[in-house]
Amino acid sequence: MAPPRCRKLSDVTQTTDATAVPGNRREPFPGPRRRVHRAWWVAAVTFVTIIGAAAFRSLPGILIDPLHDEFGWSRGTIGAAVSVNLALYGLTAPFAAALMDRFGIRRVVAVALAVIALGSGLTVWMNSAWQLILCWGLLVGLGSGSMALAFAATVTNRWFTERRGLVTGVLTAASASGQLIFLPLLSWIVQRHDWRPAAVTVALAALAVIPFVWLLLHDHPADVGQKPYGARQFVPKPAPVPGAARRALTVLFSAARTGPFWLLAGTFAICGASTNGLVQTHFVPAAHDHGMPITAAASLLAVIGVFDVVGTVASGWFTDRFEPRRLLAVYYALRGVSLLFLPMLLAPSVHPPMVFFIVFYGLDWVATVPPTLALCREQYGEDSAIVFGWVLASHQVGAALVAFLGGVARDRFGSYDVVWVASGALCAAAALMALVIRRRPVAAGLPSAGQA
């Protein structure tokens, strides 16, 4: 009997190396060290991009008084330009999510940044209100809308199957981080120099982010031969989906036939009205009405951004573990109570009760995003990013209405008090709406909101 043939070391090496990931990329030989999954690097680039995008949304609240003083435009007129910006920020989001499915995340975001730089840069030559609406309302609104939270939802859905709530919270908090970075800087530039250098700063910030997006933001895990974070099986990259606009509208018409969509859209419209539309746009001029310096008011708004980071990341962690409907109800109820007390806290100087409001409100600012996105995933599955884009559109429509009506109320009544009280009442209604969103049974293969 012939002795058994010994295998060569090269045979063993070839056998071990034969397990390859689809896409002609081979997995490395198992070693003692675990490499950081590429999904976290993509999330980091997305975080930086959203931070840059926050600069474009930080400026309008600082410019209301300077534009009013230089051009004589009413606060309602300036608020109209801000409302166009906020509305387009939301209405663009679902189409941007569909465009990302068609052309890729990297291309859509790079073009959006270029459009923002163009719109912000052109404002330095404007001398009529319609030019403000065109540049800051239309161009910056379209560009920033393409990098809205639907962008974060698309990245999260493609690159993660675990820790989605946490990642959503972190990416949502990026907007607050950008507000923290840019608000004090932009307010200092406006006060020391003029509003035009501040607009140029925003344009340069948009241009600076483009190289990072183009070089580091990959569209799909399959592009680098990896599985989504937490996935047990390799997920091939889907084929480009043609007809982006048609798909966005088809998903809207389908979702609009369900009750949860309208409840989610209604609560998120109130969320936008009480944050972007009211506090982000009108807090600085309202505080200035009570004698507070613009830089101090802008710094308080930036501090909201600090605690927003903590609150949103914590909300993502809570969303992975608790019922998102109850979380939303608690968030909206607490926000409404805090807004009812704000008119009594505004004063020429910063005092402890105002600091308490800033911390409290900051923790709740966009804590609503992770549970809202989790409910979209639970209800609408693979179409959840586009559905969330439409829900975000309602958020920005609510913000746009209050940005405009808040300015009109200030012109009409001489103060913002009625707007704070009305927004507090709306938040109470949103808390009740969140509690009546029905649960959807978990389908096979579709993670529940708590798993998403």
Image (cartoon, grey):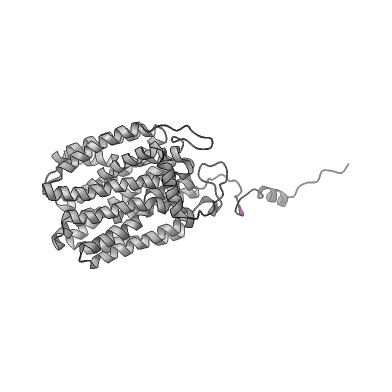
> Which of 255 and 296 lies nearest the eye of the viewer?
255
Residue 233: image x %, image y %?
57, 43
One can see residue 423 in this view? yes
Image quarter hosting the C terminus: top left
Number of labels in the image equals 0
Q: Residue at x 28, y 58 (%)?
A: 137
Tell which of 42 and 387 is nearer to you: 387
Is residue 264 located in the magenta-colored stretch of the structure? no
Q: Nearer the viewer, residue 193 or 96?
A: 96
Question: Residue 438: x and y, percent?
Answer: 40, 32
Q: Is residue 366 visible?
A: no
Picture quadrant where residue 372 is located: top left
Q: Between 293 and 398, which is closer to the camera in this rendering?
A: 398
**Residue 353 at x, y percent in the picture:** 17, 38
Name the residue rendered at 25%, 46% in the picture.
Answer: 303
In screen coordinates, is 23 left or right of 281? right
Q: Can residue 24 be found in the magenta stretch? A: yes
Q: Which residues are magenta?
A: 20-25
User: In x, y percent, where is residue 308?
Assistant: 30, 43
**Residue 125 is drawn in which quadrant?**
bottom left
Relative horizontal placement of residue 344, taking residue 303 as reference (left or right)? left
Furthest-right residue in this view: 1
Q: Quadrant of the N terminus?
A: top right
Residue 170 is drawn in which quadrant? top left
